[in-house]
Amino acid sequence: MNIKKIWNRLGSNKGAAVSVGVSVGVNVSTSAVYSEATAKRFIEDAIFLYKQAIASNDELEHKRFSRLTIMVIPFYLESLSNFLFDIFIDKKLDDVDKRSELPESIRRFRAVYNKLLNKELKDKDFNGIRDIFTVRNKITAHPAGRSKMRTTENGWEREDKNIFYYKLGRLPKVYSHFYPEHADLVFIEVRDFLTKYINSIKHKLTEEQYNYIWPNELIELKGT
């Protein structure tokens, strides 16, 4: 086994941590431990899909890549919330956050915020993120066999499922209605939430932790 090849291949992923051990006895054996920067991979994938959406000249591809972009973002947020929760909280989620009506990722962000700052993360600070999980939970993760629509004074609305957005009211309520501008809206909301949240707790983070969760990719894409 070529240890150098293993090291170079795994370590080439940005944010990855690799360690290699060698055991010498009657037989020579090697082992490698690889820690992947999961959150980084998710946001890189989301940005790649978004760029495909805006570059395409095909209407169907505009919508298809936009939907896929938005589907990936909750996994990015979930990965970040798991990362922070695993570092700072040594209890079960239900023991440290009682807001069972909220997505678990938001509850983990809340629990860490409360532990580090001894105060509550307000609903107005995460309502946009809540809306993004509403898209995941009510439109993409558990899709209807067919979406029933009716006309209202606000345009077409879903008749078969109650979908309410707390902040991002411009987001569609039907799977096939997403466009690049909706992915753009989601990116900006995630950037704004994370920069504010991380700046609030950064004095409790190591440099390595801060660099990992800071949304450089979104800032480079959408500015500050």
Image: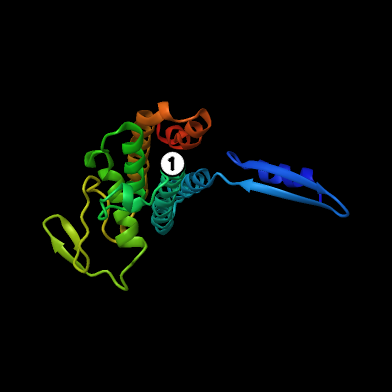
- Residue at 28% across, 61% down: 174
Q: Tell me what residue is drawn at x 37 percent, y 42 percent.
A: 187
Position of residue 212 in the picture relative to residue 16 (left or right)? left
The residue wearing badge 1 is 84
Q: Residue at x 35, y 51 (%)?
A: 93
**Residue 176 visible (yes or no):** no
x and y, in percent, of residue 78 in the image? 41, 49
Label 1 Cα crowd, 10 Å radius (few <14 / some 14-19 / many 20+): some
Image spot of residue 214 (x, y percent)? 45, 34
- Taking depth in this image into account, of 175 and 134 the one nearest to the observer is 134
Identity of the residue furthest to the left in this view: 153
Residue 62 shown left or right of residue 152 in the figure: right
Q: Nearer the viewer, residue 192 or 120?
A: 120
Q: In the orientation shown, which residue stands out farthest toward the top? A: 203
The C terminus lies in which quarter of the figure?
Answer: top left
Q: Is residue 197 above or below residue 24?
A: above
Rendered image quadrant of residue 147: bottom left
Q: Nearer the viewer, residue 17 or 41?
A: 17
Residue 98 spot, x, y in % from top left: 26, 51
Q: Secondary structure at mark 1?
A: helix
- Looking at the picture, does residue 9 appear above or below residue 176? above
Give the farthest residue toward the bottom: 145
Question: Measured from the top left, where is residue 55 in percent x and y?
Answer: 46, 46
